[in-house]
Image (spheres, rainbow, N blue to C red):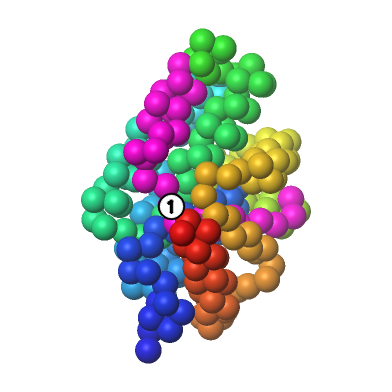
Amino acid sequence: MDLRTKYEIPGNAVITIAGTVGVGKSTMTNTLAKALGFRTSLEKVDTNPYLDKFYADFERWSFHLQIYFLAERFKEQKRIFEYGGGFVQDRSIYEDTGIFAKMHYEKGTMSEVDYQTYTSLFEAMVMTPYFPHPDLLIYLEGSIDDVVSRIRERGRPMEQQTPIDYWLEMHERYENWINTFNGCPVLRLNINDYDIIDNDSSIEPIIERIAYFIRKSQLLKK
């Protein structure tokens, strides 16, 4: 019996993985999708025309980057639900406004006009009853030391060259964001509590917890 059937996870479920850079979102997305027999929805970093420019000049490119991410994630969310679900998604659309755009506005690397334009667009596209929200958001968390260590070990060159103060602030902002997030049910996983790279069987306890959270959420909706 496969794990999705064993734990009675709906075949049309949509699970989103969230967390700061370095926590292993892509690894979790691929491993979980394989275990459940779901499709993956991965962040398209290599085809992003703004990412390298952004890391070189936050102030000039932050607005462009956020608009690009918003458009791509919105299109991807629509695609997922047109397929009928059965997806694990790398990074949520909610992080863009709750963390990144807000951070650049507060730090002065996004103008007030650009920030208002971005947030108005986000609210019109996402914060409506018509937008298909995920069944569960899995938040991967770890200490700042663990996160920075992982970035130094296997981060992209542009991430490794980014000052550590940026990652310290990002870590704090992620923690503040998830503590108030209520867009969909949340399952928090500490990255030190499992090892899905070297131990395949460690994904099953995670799937058991996912099933519990989805069932609980469905009961609350009734």
Quadrant housing residue 198: bottom right
Taking the magenta stretch, the answer to whether it contains residue 57 is: no
Q: Is residue 18 above or below residue 158?
A: below
Q: Is residue 214 above or below residue 198?
A: above
Density class for disc 1 (Cα within 10 Å; few <14, some 14-19, many ≥20) is: many
**Residue 115 image point, x, y percent:** 53, 18
Quadrant housing residue 141: bottom right
Q: Is residue 120 visible?
A: yes
Image: magenta residue range? 117-144
**184 or 109: nearer the eye?**
184
**138 or 162: nearer the eye?**
138
- Residue type at mark 1 is Pro
Q: Is residue 213 left or right of residue 88?
A: right
Residue that numbered label 1 is attached to = 134
Q: Is residue 163 above or below residue 219?
A: above
What residue is shown at x 54% (from left), y 76% (from top)? Answer: 208
What residue is shown at x 64% (from left), y 16% (from top)? Answer: 108
Q: Is residue 150 left or right of residue 84?
A: right
Q: Which quarter of the rendered picture does the N terminus lie within?
A: bottom left
For this orientation, the residue located farthest to the top is 113
**Residue 65 image point, x, y percent:** 44, 28
Quadrant housing residue 143: bottom right
**Residue 44 image point, x, y percent:** 37, 45
**Residue 98 image point, x, y percent:** 57, 34
**167 or 74: nearer the eye?**
74
Element on which disc 1 rests: loop
